[in-house]
Amino acid sequence: MHANLEQAMAYIRQHGSPLELARLHIALGKQTTIDEARQQVAALQNPDGGWPYRQQEGQPSSLAATHHALTWLAELGLRNDPLTQRGLDFLITTQQLDGSWRESDQVALLKPPHWMSPENEMANAYLTADSAYHLAVGRDPQLDAVTSACNYLYQLDLEEQYPQAIWIMGALFTMAEGEESEVAQATREYLEARLDSQWDASALAWLLNTYLNAGVSAHTSLLTHARALLESAQQPNGSFSSDDGDPFTLDVTIQAVRALQMAAGVV
C-alpha cells in the first residue's frame, strides 16, 4: 500500500502554522520563504543557546526542547545558521564529564516527565544519544564530544533502553563507525527483529528520518520494512497519528511526509 501524500499535504495545509507549512514545503523539495518560520524558532532561543523547557518563554533551557528546535532548523535547511550553531554550542557546554547528557537541576525542579528526568538513567541515555546525534549531523561525527558520548553508550544494554534511544544510537553509531560496522549492524538487526505493525506512525517516521538523515540507504532491510509499515499507517483523513494523542498528529504527519519523500529520493 502506498501512502496518499496529496491527502497528507492537504491535511497539513489546513491545520499548519507558518513553521509547519515551511517544513512541509521543504520536505516536498519546493522553494519557500522561511523568514517567518525561522523567526518563530528564533524568538524562543535562550541567551545560553538552548531552547526553553516545553518551548515556553522564560523557562530554563532544556535538552529535549533544544533537540526539537534543532530538528526544525535542520528541516528548514538552516544547519549552518547562527541559531543552529548556538544550539550546538549549548549541547557541547552541557555535556557531562562521563560523556553523557542529562537535564539540568533547573529543569528537574519543574518536575519534567519521567522520560526527561535526570533521575532516570534511561532518560539520560536517550538524551545522550540525541545530543550526540545532533552534533554528529550538524557538525562532525568525529567530534571529541561525539566520541565521548559513543563510548558512554557502547556500555549500555539495549534491552534496558527506550526504543527511540536505540534507533538514535544506531544512526549515531553508523555515522561514527560506518554503516557496515559491527555495532551499527547489530543495532539495526535488534530493531528489525522488533519492528511490527504495533509501532505507531510517529515511531516509524522518527526512525526513518533519523537513519536517512545519517546517510543510511533507504534500501536497507530495516528502512524498507519501516517504510512499508508507515505507508499502511495513514489515516482516512490523510494524517498520520501518534499514540501520544491528537495534539501530535500534525507534527507526525509532517515527519511522515518527509520520511517518505526522503526514502523515495525526493529530498
Image (cartoon, rainbow, N blue to C red):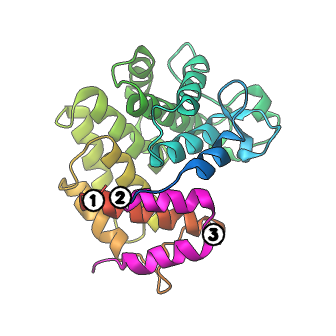
Q: Residue at x 17, y 56 (%)?
A: 219
- Looking at the rendered structure, the kind of residue marked 3 is Gly
In-image side of 88 versus 43 (left or right):
left
Q: Select label 3 or label 2 by which is in front.
A: 2
Among numbered discs 3 and 1, the one appearing first in the sequence: 3
Q: Which region shows up in magenta? A: 1-28
- Res. 204 in view: no
Return the residue at label 3. 245
Name the spot of residue 41 as percent of width and height, x first: 64, 44
Quick one: SS at disc 2? loop
Whole-Å distance between the Cαs marked 3 and 2?
Answer: 29 Å
Quick one: SS at disc 3? loop
Return the residue at label 1. 266
- Res. 18 in view: yes
In-image side of 103 versus 196 (left or right):
right
> Disc 2 vs disc 1: Cβ atoms closer than 8 Å?
yes
Q: Select label 3 or label 1 by which is in front.
A: 1
Does 8 appear above or below 191?
A: below
Return the residue at label 2. 29
Q: Which residue of the protein is positioned furthest toward the bottom in this rendering?
A: 236
Whole-Å distance between the Cαs marked 3 and 1?
Answer: 29 Å
Whole-Å distance between the Cαs marked 2 and 1?
Answer: 7 Å
> Disc 3 vs disc 2: Cβ atoms closer than 8 Å?
no
Among numbered discs 2 and 1, the one appearing first in the sequence: 2
Q: Residue at x 54, y 39 (%)?
A: 70
Q: Residue at x 58, y 48 (%)?
A: 35
Quick one: SS at disc 1? loop
Residue 106's image quarter?
top right
- Looking at the rendered structure, the kind of residue marked 2 is Gly
